[in-house]
Each structure stands twice: as structure tokens, then as C-alpha cells.
Image: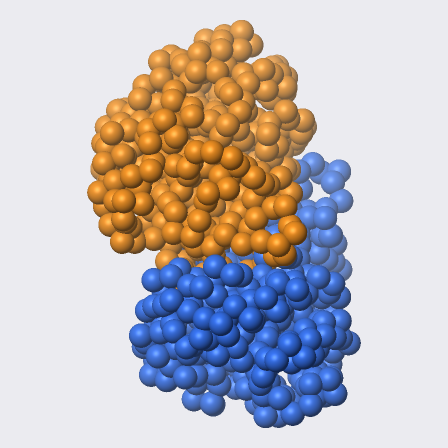
Chain colours: A blue, B orange
Amino acid sequence: MLDAAALAGVSPRAIDPHPLRSAATPAQETFIRTAAYDGPVMVFGLGLLRAKYRALAAGLGDAAIHYAVKANPAPEVIAALAGMGCRFDAASRGEIALCLSLGIAPERIAFGNTIKRAADIAWAHRAGIRQFAVDAEEEVRKIAAHAPGARVLVRLLIEESEADWPLCRKFGTTRREALRLMDLGRFLGLEVAGISFHAGSQLREPAMWRGALDAALALWTEAEAAGHRLSLLNIGGGFPAFYGQETPATEDYARTVIGMVRARFGDVAVMAEPGRGLVAEAGLILAEVLLVARKDPADLARWVYLDIGKYSGLAETTDEAIRYQLETGHEGETGPCILAGPSCDSTDVLYEKRPVQLPLALAEGDRVRILACGAYTSSYSSVGFNGFPPLRSVFVG
Amino acid sequence: MLDAAALAGVSPRAIDPHPLRSAATPAQETFIRTAAYDGPVMVFGLGLLRAKYRALAAGLGDAAIHYAVKANPAPEVIAALAGMGCRFDAASRGEIALCLSLGIAPERIAFGNTIKRAADIAWAHRAGIRQFAVDAEEEVRKIAAHAPGARVLVRLLIEESEADWPLCRKFGTTRREALRLMDLGRFLGLEVAGISFHAGSQLREPAMWRGALDAALALWTEAEAAGHRLSLLNIGGGFPAFYGQETPATEDYARTVIGMVRARFGDVAVMAEPGRGLVAEAGLILAEVLLVARKDPADLARWVYLDIGKYSGLAETTDEAIRYQLETGHEGETGPCILAGPSCDSTDVLYEKRPVQLPLALAEGDRVRILACGAYTSSYSSVGFNGFPPLRSVFVG
């Protein structure tokens, strides 16, 4: 049960060191201060999401926004975005079915995964999905067979990236192979509409897009020279969230990126697939400290164990890739802590190589807020590893 | 739908290169050959589980076996083991509640997680759980407050390990601190019954237990000298599964380990907590190839994409730690493949640094069997990352 007295020490000043980027909304505060605590919970502010969408849309101008559903597939999130005119990028039949079940027209949904079961392509085609991503010959043939005449975008492999989290070679194909796939697609009666790419996750600065855009332009130019009439450029995701390192304001960022696109591609149709950049900052996770311990009285660093870990929502802490900001409500002196989850699994350690600074006063039973957790948390959560239930979400205004 | 013709090529010889360790049972074969294919599924042989339990019990003699529920918390698994006299090691209130709901008496369940919510300790105590693990002062105080008089085992940190997968410092405490915790526990009225440790996961050879057993003996001796009357040694888990590297037969292995224990500790009560070693080999996952591709015609390695990946059950492929054996039903020449999951996530790559050799004939739509998947798969599975449903399990004889 949430103890109001335990939270009384959480002053607005202490919990809000980044007032412009991570402040809880009044609705989030109200939930946190009044609801009974029943294990970790994501408190998602739909107002924050709407504000983010507006800023991104203002910056992106007439580029179409396809929300990457995988970042947070909660129906509340999808419905809120759909109501603002957003389109959707789906990774699977399951995500397409979810969008359709919420009344979203199939023309507003693209099947963006380059790895698709043949039966799912056929199902999507029957459901009215018209746009598919491809990066391999077998995939082009599957689409020609199961979604005849569909629009395809060929995904280019971006080998060099300045992203915080560079993508591997799993998706996309080389320029030479991409051209071959375009020829094959046209031969098989598909509408080869353009190209897609993903410049990487969490591109903190617009300049990080440059290499990917140049590579995309080289393919585009070569394809046109080879007789393809391309009309649609999909710039993918990569729009950043605030995890403690400063990034430009959302609208400015988006406007700069789209300016770089226009400078290269002129007046083509553009679509973007933000996921993290739309939803991450709208959600915070309320969690509890289960134990604070030193392995030996002489140890400098304490071990802090939370009731949420890598297998109940915080999977993106793997390799300490995403470093979530924590607010504890304590002021005063801090010290280095190794942060770990509650499971009986030695890999369930969140931050060890780079310990986090937490107040010396932190103790068992304290509540902590983990910021910018709206993306890639609830849906990553395990079904029940170690008997811990999946991360719950609540949606507030 | 499963196509019987597609499986006709799966000859018993081709699918069974390790006849003694990985053969599917007739019941597993029958399911695979007759059930409609509806996405990845674990086919778990309860007969294999029972045989493994019997072999382990025979080797361990009068040591108590507490199955580590976290390895596979399926009610079918727990009930089968309970019926054979097995005891249980629970990681959470959720796992305790699951065992109790299956009619298992609380005396047969130990609360083995050293990180526990105070409210969960109180709940477990009320439910009749008497044995708890501790490795920190705060935890000893919580148990004294919420489970007065309970039996505690102090968990020793094993710093050096020869395990395939050494555990980090997350669990256990130093010898000096362990002695202090024993004193504190006794002072607070707890029954300080003994010590526990975990020598690491997947200890392929009994010799790998030596360092941990020596460290435990040193603590045991020192504690007795300090006036503690210890009676119970918990040797934890670490019993190996067969993932392609030879290990001794289960009964021989267990007998050797228990011999090493008796040589050091004499006639004390011993308990062991096998998880992986009991259930891994009893389950295989039937999956499907979604796509085989080369990023460039000149590439040597192919990319093979399955309909199951790191976020739908195969989490232990992180850092390529567990290398599952694959059977494809194809014979003939093989070549190197990078194996990846179906999600739109660049981290969802199973084996890339050390590619796997797979038949050149492998193609989209083929079924593959992933062996020794009975542990740490279904419960690690995400709730629905990328819209893919959690791993299903079926239980056969």
C-alpha cells in the first residue's frame, strides 16, 4: 500500500531537476500521491504524448507520421495518436490487428517489418494493408505472391551510423542488392514506390542523420537513373528521448531533419516512423526499493535492489544502453550504487559498470521514479519471470 | 497450418544426431507430426522430466531436491515433480502462491530469493513458509520482524567460479559479513540453520564445484567455531543441461558432486536447487523459418530469420551465452548462418559472432527444432513485444 507519509518528503524541487523535460504532470502527481501502491507501475501522461505529437508534427510539416506501434502498443496510446491524425507502422500481424480493432483504416497502416510470414502477408493484404517493407529477394517474391500489386519500399542497410545505439546488419540490404530487388519487384508487378532506411536509435543531434540521408540519396539517384519512378521516402525512426543528455527541442529538431531531407530529395513524399521519440517521455515508472546492502562493510558502492528489473520492463538496460534517470525524493549527500532488479537472476543487474549516484539516505521501502520509461518497457516485460507479474500501465490526462 | 508433406523430409536419423540426449520422445514426435502449426511452441515431454528427476534423485541420495521454479513455472511441470516427492525453491510470492495452489504443503517450499519485499515475507510467513535466504543485514531484520523465529540460510558470495556462466556479485555476501549476519540472526531470534551458495550456472563438470564447496566449508567451520550450530547446507543449482558439449550422465554427475560434499561436510543435511538441470532437456521448441537472405550476393553467411527470437522465449541467447542445438530435417552441405528473431529490433539477433552451420537447402517455411529449451524460455518470453504472442507450451507424455 502506498503510504502518503512516505511520499511527503518528495518535494517538487527534489523530484524535478529537469523541469522542462521530465516534470510529472498534475495528473501523474495525483495518481502517484493517491493510488495504493501495488508493485511497479507505469504512469503514462496522455497530455504529454499529445504535446509531443503536436511538436513533432509541426516540425515535420507535410511528412506523414507513422507511429512505430512496437514502442508502446497500449490501446490508449494508439487511440490518442489516431485521434490526432497519426498513421501507424506495424511490426506484425498482431499489431495490425490491434490497430484495426481500434477503428483505424488500413490505408493508415504500413507493414514495416522486413521479416514476414507468408500467411501474414496474405492476411494483411486481405485486411486492406497496401504498403510493405522488403530487403530480400525471398520477401519480394512472397509479397508478389500473397499481396499482388502491393506498394513496396526497399530498405537500405545503413552501414555507418553515429547513433547512440547503432543498428546492426539485421535489416536492410546493400545498394547493389536494393537495385536488384527494385527490378525484381517491378518485374513481378509490384509498385516499387521508394526506399526506407533506419539511421539508428536515439539520434541525439540532427547531424547524426547526415550519413544515412546521403546513402539514401545515392540509392535514390541510381534507381531513378535505372528507370524507377520513386515517389516515397521513409526516413524511419531515431527521434530521440531525453535520458539525461541534452537534445534540441522536438519541433526544432524535426524541422532541421526535414530540412536536410528536402535539401537532398526536394519535393518527394516523406514519411517518418517515430516510436521512442513520441512516447518515451510521456511515461514514468513508479517503483520501490526492496533492499540496500553492502557486500562488505568496507565496500564503497552499495547494492540497491528495486522491485522492477531487466525482465519486468527495463530490458533496454542491457549493456547499460539506455540510462534511465532516477528521482528518489531524498536530498543530501549521494554515493555510488549498483542498481539491480528483484529476480533470482544474476544477469538482472541494471547499472554496474557505470554505477548511479543515489542518496545515502535511500532505504528499503522508498519509492523511486524512473523517468522517460514510456517506450520499450511494458511490451518488453516478461510474462512472469521469477513469478513477478508484467509491468502494469495506467493512463492519466 | 502444419503441412505433413513439409515434415515428411524430417527423417529420424536427420533429427537425432545426439540419440542419448536429445531424441524427441514418441509423444513429442506425434504432436509435432500431427498438430496444426500455429506459431512457435514448446513441446515438453513430462516423461523426460520424470526420468531426469529419478536420475538426479538417485545420484543425490538423501539430499533434498528443491526444484527452482523459475526455470519453468508451468503448473504441469510443478505438479509432475510434486508427485515424485520433489520440494521447491521459490523466487517470489507469485511462485509460492502457484505452488500452494497446486496443493503443495508450505513445508516443502523455501523462499530462496535474497531480495524480498517486507510485505511478501509477512505473507509467506502467514502462509506457512518457514525457510528464507538472506545475504544482507536489512534482509535479516526484515525476516526477524515479519517472520519471527523463521529458519534462515545465509548466502555466501562465490567470487571465483569455473562455471560457463559465472554469477556476478548480485547474490551472497562475503565470509566476514556472513558471520556477522549469523550473529545478528541469532540475536534477533531466528534459527540460523546453515549456509547456501550458488557455484554458477551450467557447471559442466563436477570439478567445477570444488572452489565453491571449499569456500562454503571455510565459512561453515568458522561459524561453528564462533558457536553457531549449523545443520543444513544448500548447494544451490548449477546442474548442467546438454547444449552440445558433453557432460557426465546425470546420476553419475550428481553422485560425484554429493561425494565431494560428504568428503567436506560429513553427515549434515543437504539440499540442492536444480532448475535447468531438471527441465531443460525435456522441452524442444518447434519453430519456422521466415526468411533466408544474403545482404549481398557476395556474402558468405546467410541471414536466417526464425519466428521466435530473443523476446519471445530465447532470452538466454543474449551475448550468445546459451547455444541451442538446431535440427532442420535437411541433410547435405551446410554453410554459416547468422540466426535472428522476427522482431523489428536490431538486438534480436541470436547468433552472429559465432555463426551456426545450417543446411544450404534451408528455406522459408521450413520447420526447425530447437533442442533443450525446457528451461528459461517460456517464462522469459515477453508479453507481446512487436505484437508477437508469448511462447506457448504443450505438455505430452
Q: Position of residue A129 (x, y in %)?
A: 39, 77
* Residue A191 in view in this figure: yes
| Residue sitting at x 35%, y 23% | B52
| Residue sitting at x 42%, y 52% | B364
User: Is residue A203 depicted above or below A59 in this figure?
Assistant: above
Q: Position of residue B75 (x, y in %)?
A: 28, 41
User: Is residue B334 depicted above or below A289 in this figure?
Assistant: above
- Most foreground residue, B342 or A324: B342
- Most foreground residue, B265 or A109: A109
Horizontal side, residue B340 vs residue A301: left or right: left
Q: Position of residue B382 (x, y in %)?
A: 44, 55
- Residue A18: name its quadrant: bottom right
| Residue sitting at x 62%, y 63% | A177
| Residue sitting at x 41%, y 77% | A149
Q: Position of residue A255 (x, y in %)?
A: 69, 88
**Label total for image:** 0
Quarter occupied by the C terminus of chain B: top left
User: Is residue B131 depicted above or below A339 in this figure?
Assistant: above
Horizontal side, residue A40 vs residue B218: left or right: left
* Residue A6 in view in this figure: no
- Most foreground residue, B116 or B122: B116
- Residue A289: name its quadrant: bottom right
Horizontal side, residue A15 vs residue A256: left or right: left
